Amino acid sequence: MREKAKENIVNDFYKKCRQAGLSLTPQRLAIYNSLIGNDDHPSPDMIYKRIKTDYPTISFATVYKTLETFERKNIISKVTNLHNTLRYDPLTKKHHHIICKRCYRIMDLISKELNSLPIPAQVTKDNVLLDYSVHFNVICAECKEKE
Amino acid sequence: MREKAKENIVNDFYKKCRQAGLSLTPQRLAIYNSLIGNDDHPSPDMIYKRIKTDYPTISFATVYKTLETFERKNIISKVTNLHNTLRYDPLTKKHHHIICKRCYRIMDLISKELNSLPIPAQVTKDNVLLDYSVHFNVICAECKEKE
DNA sequence: TTACCTGCAAAAGGTTTGCAGGCTA
DNA sequence: TAGCCTGCAAACCTTTTGCAGGTAA
């Protein structure tokens, strides 16, 4: 059963690569596996460390490049669109953000409706909820123009 | 009128600092002003550059420390809780995230209700909407335990 | 065989830290 | 005056880049 599940993951991966026009390499499979096998949303560094045991010569460059490729081909997703640098906001009251995925422009969005969403039980079950906000990922007018 | 508005901002700032038990310094006022005067959610680097003209000896350390202090005292807010490093997710279908503000643990949240929110007109007015997700900022069980 | 992929090393950003001197209250 | 704040410089961590050699198809 366990073996079967593993095999399915490998087959899935092969299929996804073929569809995306990507070469199959052991390194890529290892990186994919280290993501699929965990729900901890790893950083490149965490992935590098997990793989290092089986692939002692793996490099950070490969990890970074592979993750970026996977994301571009929609095989995985990136949680952190605004990781590049800290960004601050003078607005401290509850609000939401519209974020351009190309230029990282951030726009405030004040919306009564979004301020009173139903909170899923899973959120408050084990955690103390501080606040929440909705992120709208967009391509802004200016970036759309350019494309 | 203009002068009056400026004066109000300064008074506001003084009040906030007093309430927070912070010393008033010209640098802090300058940093605060550079945020209040703009809705572009600046990075520390952008703030540094804006202030450099009036305060040629300002340092990055001061900008970083001041911004962190302001945020801790709720005078401003940080847009990017997950800027520390890239984080990836094998889940590509629409979902949401529960994020611990202390340890940066990220948990997936799948919710039908949250998948069909009303989209405010402001979002689609000028931009192409790609997707959206709700971020729940929490203190997770483990971190709560520690505090 | 060809194009793509990997690994190395160096460089480039962005952020943090420690400390000495200066300023606010 | 005491304690907090600033500015400098160095260190640190994460990410990117260019290139030479290797591998998948």
Image (tube, coloured by chain):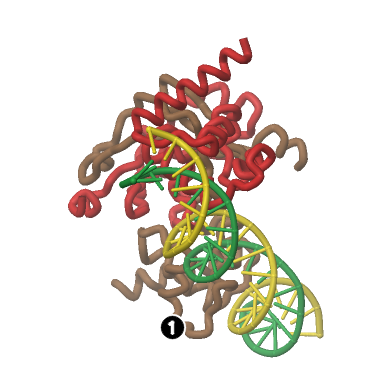
Chain colours: A brown, B red, C yellow, D green
Q: Position of residue C21 (x, y in %)?
A: 51, 55
Q: Position of residue B39 (x, y in %)?
A: 58, 30
Rendered-image quadrant of the N terminus of chain B: top right
Quarter holding residue A117: top left
Q: Which residue is mark 1?
A: A54
Residue most extreme to the top: B1
Quarter holding residue B43: top right
Q: Name the amino acid, label 1.
A: Asp
Q: Is residue A48 left or right of residue D22?
A: left
Q: Residue at x 37, y 53 (%)?
A: B104
Q: Is residue A77 shown to the viewer in this render?
A: no
Q: Secondary structure at mark 1?
A: loop
Label 1 Cα neighbours within 10 Å, binned few <14 / some 14-19 / many ≥20:
few
Q: Is residue B114 left or right of residue A26?
A: left
* Pointer 1 chain: A
Q: Position of residue B6 (x, y in %)?
A: 57, 19
Q: Position of residue A97 (x, y in %)?
A: 51, 33
Residue most extreme to the left: B145
Which is nearer the eye, B134 or A75? B134
Q: Is residue A51 shown to the viewer in this render?
A: yes
Q: Residue at x 53, y 29 (%)?
A: A108
